[in-house]
Amino acid sequence: TMKAKKLILVTSESHPSHKAFVKVTEDLSTQLNLEKEIKIEDYTFLTDYGEKDEFGMPFLPQLFVQTDDGKIVPVLTQMPFNQKFQPDPEKGKEEAINKIKNIT
């Protein structure tokens, strides 16, 4: 099976979910022992690998995992919110871990 090798976060420092996405990336990197790379506003990368909105446009932040054979898969594209409508990095982390575990 393919193994996750590296986390790649494409983000924008001005985005309201930026800090939550960075936290998820850093926590997962430590927890799963993965390299991490943060790209700022790399729309070319998003266009190639990311999910698109309903108008077919790339959006950020999006977190990807790169497998040891070079495949790049989105693992967190929408940060979950808590009851207070604030970004919830813990829930985001769970979601990303589940996707990373199920990479085939």
Image: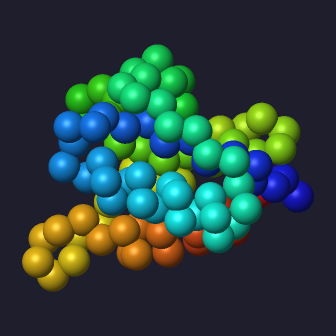
Give the residue at x 17% y 68%. 86
The reply, left or right, for residue 38 in relation to residue 66 is: left
Give the residue at x 62% y 58%. 29
Please, is residue 86 above or below residue 46 in the view? below
Residue 25 in the image, given as x and y percentages of width and height: 51, 55
Quarter of the figure that contains the N terminus: bottom right
The reply, left or right, for residue 34 in relation to residue 69 is: left
* Structure colour scheme: rainbow
- Viewer-closest of 94 and 26: 26
The reply, left or right, for residue 63 in relation to residue 102 is: left
- Viewer-closest of 3 and 34: 34
Give the residue at x 53% y 65%. 27
- Viewer-closest of 29 and 76: 29
Quarter of the figure that contains the C terminus: bottom right
Asked if residue 17 can be seen in this view, the reply is: yes
Residue 36 in the image, given as x and y percentages of width and height: 62, 45
Asked if residue 99 can be seen in this view, the reply is: no
Residue 96 in the image, given as x and y percentages of width and height: 53, 64
Residue 62 in the image, given as x and y percentages of width and height: 42, 44
Give the residue at x 77% y 35%. 70
Please, is residue 30 above or below residue 42 in the view? below
The residue lying furthest to the right in this view is 1
The residue lying furthest to the top in this view is 44
